[in-house]
Amino acid sequence: MKYLLLIATIGTTIFAACNNGNNNPSQTAGDSTPTKKEAASTAGTATPVKDILGGYLQLKNALANDNGNDAATAGNTMVDAFQKIDTSALTPAQKKTYADVQDDAREHAEHIGKNAANVPHQREHFDMLSKDMYELVKTFGAGQPLYKDSCPMYNDGKGAIWLSELKGIKNPYLGKKMPTCGTVKEELK
């Protein structure tokens, strides 16, 4: 009788554990189990962070194509996305990082949005914005694979980083002049 009770308990535990992961509608078959960071980011903050990142990636691609108008549009998209994030759902650590980053990042996105005719100026702000976005992605996750890329030639050889959804280099700092200048420094998952 003890063995039957033990087997029933183990069976129930295994059944409950197996079904626990299937209750998340944001996961599909084949998805890997989310990390604590990803789980925290999907608890009410994934959509705004995703929107901020989406605007950033559009901005990066526009600068890689030397397109100041599209870069300005993407900068404005980011400003709107920053205004929509709900900080009440963030953990204390996430709130701190977001507070440290969001004012600065939003200001850079605003400058990019207001300077459609000045791509070099947009790139200056993109340099600083990329550092802020890297911090956001490290804290909240991206919900997609990203690559931290580096251009050693930008800013008189001081270099600069950017985030990309592509493994191949599309340099937003040198644009069409040197589109493949740079290296992948880190893969972010």
Image (spheres, helix red, strand yellow):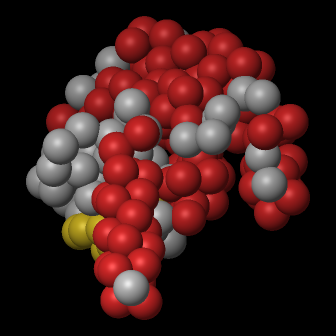
- Say which residue appears at 70% left-offset and 40% top-offset: 105
- Say which residue appears at 34% left-offset and 80% top-offset: 4
The image quadrant that residue 81 belongs to is top right
Q: Nearer the viewer, residue 55 or 67?
A: 55
Q: Nearer the viewer, residue 103 or 181?
A: 103
Residue 156 visible, this angle = no
Q: Nearer the viewer, residue 124 or 18?
A: 18
Residue 67's spot in the image, x, y percent? Answer: 33, 19
Report the residue that reaches farthest toward the bottom: 2
Q: Is residue 120 above or below residue 110?
A: below
Q: Nearer the viewer, residue 69 or 28?
A: 28
Report the residue that reaches farthest toward the front: 1
Residue 96 vs residue 181: left or right? right
Residue 87 visible, this angle = yes
- Name the image quarter holding the C terminus: bottom left
Q: Is residue 15 above or below residue 113?
A: below
Q: Is residue 11 above or below residue 77?
A: below
Residue 27 vs residue 180: left or right? right
- Say which residue appears at 57% left-offset and 61% top-offset: 37
- Say which residue appears at 61% left-offset and 28% top-offset: 48
The image quadrant that residue 1 belongs to is bottom left
Residue 158's spot in the image, x, y percent? Answer: 50, 71
Residue 10's spot in the image, x, y percent? Answer: 38, 77
Residue 165's spot in the image, x, y percent? Answer: 27, 45
